[in-house]
Image: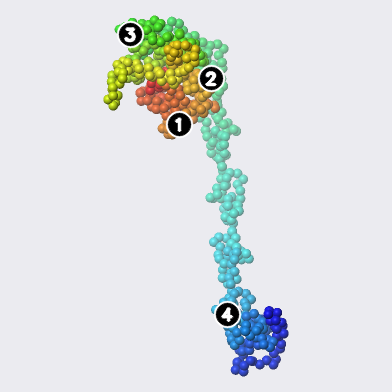
Amino acid sequence: GASEIFLAFLALVVWAGSYQPASAACTSTWTTCPSTGNFADSCDCTIFHSCGPALGTGTVMKCSAGLYYNPKNGICDWPANVKCGCTPSCTGKKCGSDGCGGSCGTCTSGTCNTATGQCVCVPSCTGKQCGNDGCGGSCGTCTSGTCNTATGQCVCAPSCTGKQCGNDGCGGSCGTCTSGTCNTATGQCVCAPSCTGKQCGNDGCGGSCGTCTSGTCNTATGQCACVPSCTGKQCGNDGCGGSCGTCTSGTCDTATGQCVATCVPSCSGKKCGPDGCNGICGSCLSNQTCSSGQCVATCTPACSGSCGSDGCGGSCGSCSAGSSCVSGQCVANPFPFKSDCPSWTKYGSAPPTTCSLPTDPQNRPPSAVEAWFTEAVYNDLFPKSNIGWGPSPCLPYSYQSFVIALRYFPTFATGYPVVTKDPTGKAFPVTYTATQAARRTLAAFFAHAVQETGENNANLYNVLSNTADADACFYRGGLFNWLEGGPSSSFVPHQPSSVADGASCNTGGLYCDTNSAYFFPCSTAKNGSWFQGCYFGRGAIQVSYNFNYGRFSRWLNQNGITHNGGPIDLLKEPNLLLTKTDPPLAMMASIW
């Protein structure tokens, strides 16, 4: 076993002064030690040569009887484990195999080239970027900087020549700017203009933060200071938010800055013309002129019956209570008058007694509807209009506004041809005359308006026992609301709301359709926290959303209708739909 081999090896070593080769025919090739260690003999397997540090010829050592020297494991081993008779070959070799399972030596440095038996140098560049590889070669060169030969690392050489600031090319800095900013491209400190919060004055770099279009520049604060202008003024604004004085008597003419005596308009007995205070007492119809404060016809009145329009804005007569004018004749009304309906709620303030009446700036000819649909009929149909105050000419839904609107749609509710069959050729169960068809069209229009903006008081059917009376009073609630949501609309600043309240809204009243905003852009203007681009419903048959306000604006401009001398833009001022009366847009938009 292993222990027996070990004990045999311990007993092995003896001086071999009487050594003889195993065979006289074999001559040993041993000469000198190639290196330290034990080496097999080329002839006798029972001996080996032990070479110490002094090298030389070494010392001949002999294995115990019955054992051979095994160069593979360096011990005296059983003959069966040793290839005896092999002649080791180490001539000219410093390392590697001796050809008999032994070694010709080991390399103290480098590695053994087993093909030549020579020790060769192994370059060492692990972790190095540059410098000597230990074998006379190089581990690389530095593309920038220099090589630290002790560490084999490339070190950066800072480059700050001519620079005041910025990167030194090695991750360091060439300096910092005490003022201004660093131009990293040139490495120079440059002045940074400072105009934050300034309107004018020096920017700190020899430039300017701007000039004042009016007033003077306070160079200490960089703000434009307003210079009050009161030369020749007694009162009014000084142009800087201050006052040029107040009037001890009279009122201030803000245009001239002069105090003028208080003017009291004089319109007693007048329907038109100047009021003596640069105002007017009213306007006449398009076919009338103002003469001595009275509206007089500019055409020849024509009356073929006892009532209705005379064709010149006047009347051929009026009908008594309980009847209406139809084709110039007074006929009994099929429904009870407004006085028979229960009282209703009126919201907000009563209409003014004087105002700018609705006008037709294009003086278009009257619609044929005016000949039979009189103001008396209109007023009887809509006593609750305008949030309960009735058809006042100073409010959006008046008879005057309606007939002017009709003139811009001359074929509406007029002159329909008699049609007896549907498009498939099937006969209608009832055939209407052209006049009947026109009047039914107008009735359908008003029915739609009742549904859309009417009072719609269903409680009438509880308080009135007769269904016909309830019907009559219910439908007389048409043209009630101006704004979507009625007098208590949640979109606008005040409740009950006025016509003017429609100019502002919260986010709920924006009605901005983003899909059409490219063609009809929504206004983003605000008045404080309230939005002005409000496209919620307005009018008797309500116009809603930006695309409808935009399309109606196009129609108005195509028909030559202007506002303050320029094109109408309802996307910018949607509330003009209620407030503009020259011509009256609320009624026009509903028919449109």
Pointer 4: what residue? 117
Q: Amino acid at mark 4?
A: Gly
Quadrant (top left/top right/bottom left/bottom right) for the C terminus? top left
Give me the residue at 68% from left, 80% from top: 1
Of tags 4 and 1, the one toward the viewer is 1
Q: Secondary structure at mark 2?
A: loop
Pointer 3: what residue? 328
Q: Amino acid at mark 3?
A: Gly
Pointer 1: what residue? 513
Q: Is residue 569 left or right of residue 438?
A: right
Q: Secondary structure at mark 3?
A: loop
Q: Amino acid at mark 1?
A: Asp
Q: Earlier in the sequence, mark 2 or mark 1?
A: 2
Eyeballing the image, is 246 above or below 95? above
Give me the residue at 70% from left, 85% from top: 12
Disc assigned to residue 495 = 2
Q: CA distance from mark 4 to mark 3?
A: 139 Å
Give me the residue at 28% from left, 20% from top: 420
Q: CA distance from mark 2 to mark 4?
A: 111 Å
Q: Nearer the viewer, residue 162 or 570?
A: 570
Give me the residue at 60% from left, 81% from top: 101
Of tags 3 and 1, the one toward the viewer is 3
- Asked whether residue 486 appears in the rendered view, the answer is yes
Q: Position of residue 181 (x, y in %)?
A: 57, 45
